[in-house]
Amino acid sequence: MTNSLSHATRALKHPAYRRFFIAQGCSLIGTWVQLVAMSWLVWRLTHSAAWLGWTGFAGQIPILFLAPFAGVWSDRFNRRKLLMVTQLLSLGQSLLLAALVWTHSAEPWHCVLLAGTLGCINAFDTPIRQSFTVMMVEDKKDMPSAIAMNSFMFNLARLIGPSIAGFMISAFSETACFLMNSVSYIGVIAVLFSLQLKNPPARPKALHLLADLAEGARYASGHPVIGRLLAQLCILSLLIAPYVQLMPIFAGQVFAGDARVLGLLIGAAGFGAVTATLFLATRRDIKILPVIIAAGSLLAGLCLALFSQSQSLPFSMVMMVGVGAGIISTAASTNTLIQHSVEDDKRGRVMSLYTISFLGIAPIGSLILGHLSEMWSAPLVLMCAGILCLLGTLRFVINLSPVQKALNVS
């Protein structure tokens, strides 16, 4: 057990990564507090599934269009300085949101607009941060640990953040949540300012930015591992990941609860995700990861379909554990295999494609599922989404052998 834990956390022996890990973990808790507070604020103001869908759509759709450019920037410029800019902009967005709610000026369109603003910032922040991890972990053998620890950090925040948000909304207001998130960015900015890292060798710039984008896309689509992994991740992101935007409906209508019930449901998914990342961090052989991706996608689809028809809060929380575990085991395993397979000079651009597949496709699903829930019902829509995910994953399962063969060669 001790050996497994030591193996899982070996990336923390790198001082730069360890400091960033702690600061980023605190910031991510603040981010999840804000996300839950934002969803509850929209639901409180509108009681509309469509508004929830539009908020989720606005918060993530910029990734679909801007992340590729962030990937090019990540390969061309100083990643540490770029991250400092994104953190400062995120801090400003949270402060503005807090001011609107504090002055009772917040309208639903404010939430959509500011969600879109943060989405634009995250479109640059996420792929740059993914590529920045490589710079903090000098030994490539420790990269799987770093990626698993990143996922653990994200999902531990998803476990803790919603619970804190539920308490803070009930005891105070959404304003307190947004202010907490603003403060959480300060630690990350301080750590980034203090880090002294060796930049990767400069690579020749293409004549045009679009040429860089095209090169990265051709490389990823033609790669025997990366292309298939990204396609499967898109299925999960389109059909399963948007469940978060519809959780206020289940908390408020199906279970007749308040923000605390919302926190329990999202926190349960976070618990499943944390459990999955701990399991992944102890894996020593990456060749098992394609099987984990297939199993995780099947688990997420099945549990979401069962959750959608549940009238029992305890059973629903158990199903949310399965959804969270399935999503993160798929996403984190995909991240690890891509980071293992990609060439260094294309890492930023390929990780931007990963970001699009994981986060950029989800808002399309949020918009579609939100409007379908207005027309029919949220339980029916999530059940259909879960079943479609199961059917879509079967194609990946059938074509699993080429991925495993490519990994054996590498």
Image: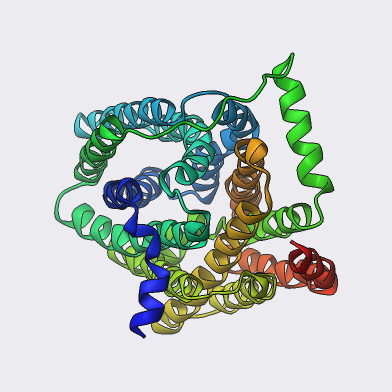
In the displayed structure, 271 sits above or below 72; it is below
Q: Residue at x 47, y 40 (%)?
A: 132
112 horizontally vs 98: left or right: right
What colouring style does the render use?
A: rainbow
* Number of numbered discs visible in the structure rendering: 0
Residue 211 drawn above or below residue 57: above
Residue toward you, 32 or 173: 32
Residue ranking furthest to the top: 207
The answer to whether residue 81 is left or right of residue 307 is left
Figure quadrant of residue 243: bottom right
Of the 4 image quadrants, the one containing the N terminus is bottom left
Left or right side of 137 for 231 = right
Who's the residue at 64% across and 32% down the image?
A: 68
Q: Looking at the rendering, in which quadrant would you find the C terminus?
A: bottom right
The reply to whether residue 25 is visible in this rendering is yes
Q: Nearer the viewer, residue 312 or 162?
A: 162
Q: Is residue 410 above or below residue 285?
A: above
Who's the residue at 63% across and 54% down the image? 369
Q: Position of residue 227 (x, y in %)?
A: 77, 52
Residue visible at 65% across and 77% down in the picture: 295
The residue nearer to you, when weighing 282 against 102, is: 282
Image x and y of residue 79, in percent: 46, 30
Q: Is residue 255 visible?
A: no
Q: Position of residue 64 (x, y in %)?
A: 64, 37
Residue 42 location (% of width, % of height): 40, 44
